[in-house]
Image (cartoon, helix red, strand yellow):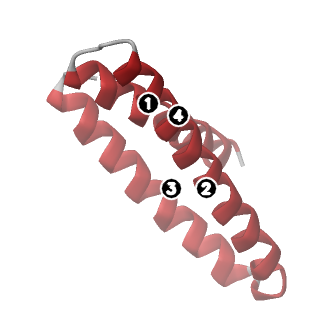
Amino acid sequence: MSNPAAYALFAWQAGWVFALRSMQLGSDPAGASVALAAMVAEKQKAFTDGAFAAGRAVMAGARPDVVAAAAMRPARRRVAANMRALHKG
């Protein structure tokens, strides 16, 4: 992910997912605690997967941009999946 536009797109998508999810939580306060717990778990998994991927890239002697891309890949996938799911319904 050496393209600066890819970082900008990721930041925009993450912000949009946050806004849409916040509206959903506000419309269903009774189910918010379950939804929030699931969101926290998905963030922890993406972070852990990214940390391990970055570690593997470092141990393989990859360039810093390749390491950064490996670290970001799980979070980018999760945010993109969330965008698709939120736009579908």
**Mark before the other along the chain sequence, 1 or 3:** 3
The image shows residue 35, relative to residue 67, as above or below, that is below
Please, what secondary structure does the residue beneath circle 1 have?
Answer: helix
- CB of mark 2 within 8 Å of CB of mark 3? no
Labels 2, 3: front one:
2
Labels 3, 4: front one:
4
**Mark before the other along the chain sequence, 3 or 4:** 3
Please, what secondary structure does the residue beneath circle 4 have?
Answer: helix
Residue drawn 53% across and 34% down?
52
Please, what secondary structure does the residue beneath circle 2 have?
Answer: helix
Q: Is residue 51 left or right of residue 49?
A: left
Residue drawn 68% across and 42% down?
88
- CB of mark 3 within 8 Å of CB of mark 4? no
What is the CA distance from the residue labelled 2 to the residue labelled 4?
Answer: 12 Å
Which residue corresponds to mark 4? 52
Query: Which quarter of the figure has residue 8?
Result: top left
Which residue corresponds to mark 1? 55
Which residue corresponds to mark 2? 44
Which residue corresponds to mark 3? 17
Q: Is residue 30 left or right of residue 20?
A: right
> What amino acid is found at the position of numbered circle 2 in the picture?
Gln
Q: Residue furthest bottom?
A: 29
Q: Position of residue 32 (x, y in %)?
A: 75, 80
Which label sits on residue 87? none
